[in-house]
Amino acid sequence: MHATLTAEHIKDDFAFYELKKSDTSFKNQVQNCMTIMKIPKADRSDKMFQKYDVKYGIRIYSSDEDTAPKILGQSTAEIPLKAPKYKTKRFDEAVGLPTDIDFDSKTLKNESIDVAANTLTDFSGITKPAKLTMETNYIAIKSTSMADVLEFNFKTEIESGKVADNEFVAAYFAYRKKGSSDTF
């Protein structure tokens, strides 16, 4: 997409990443994860705005040194990345400046999948499917000095006790141009 595009995890919101009880089932726990890609405006080509095949999922690491994480579901999707429109909707004639918000967020994809219990072989005693939800948002920031943001929000719900408080849950995604035979 762009020579400088790399994903980064947002690490300073501890409450967001905290392992929580499920709102929908008292027997489940929920883990959130977010990763973003900053999309600079300088030297950006409109060719980057197209459809992409995306492979994504959740991995659970026992420590920073873990090289064989548990896989907690994965899926593929198509994400249409369209060029943002930086339109001013309201203009203050008296001062000659826009008065509307500085950014516009659009949901590109919102997908939930059930991961069958019998496929979760890295976890012992799983009897119910896990649920993996991914929401992709494009945040167009009007300021020319600030990059736009492609945001990936992940939520995993699994039976309680299968993820420990000291384990690291990480979302991952890989992308390629739609229809490309490039590997993820």
Image (tube, rainbow, N blue to C red):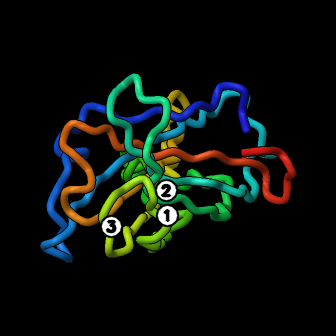
Q: Position of residue 176 (x, y in %)?
A: 74, 48
Q: Which residue is mark 2?
A: 137
- Single out the mark in the foreground, 1 or 3: 3
Q: Position of residue 61 (x, y in %)?
A: 38, 37
Residue 56 badge: none
Left or right side of 74 for 160: left
* Type of amino acid at the residue the image marks with label 2: Asn
* Type of amino acid at the residue the image marks with label 1: Thr
For the residues bearing labels 1 and 2, Cβ distance under 8 angstroms:
yes
Q: Nearer the viewer, residue 58 or 45?
A: 58
Left or right side of 107 for 17: left
- Is residue 126 placed above or below 25 in the rendered structure? above
Residue 107 badge: 1
Left or right side of 102 for 77: right
Q: Nearer the viewer, residue 168 or 66?
A: 66
Residue at horizontal 35 percent and vertical 59 percent from the top: 155
Q: Classify 10 Å Cα crowding around label 1: few (below 14), some (14-19), many (20 and above).
A: few
* Type of amino acid at the residue the image marks with label 3: Ile
Q: Which residue is mark 3?
A: 126
In the picture, residue 42 is in which quadrant? top right
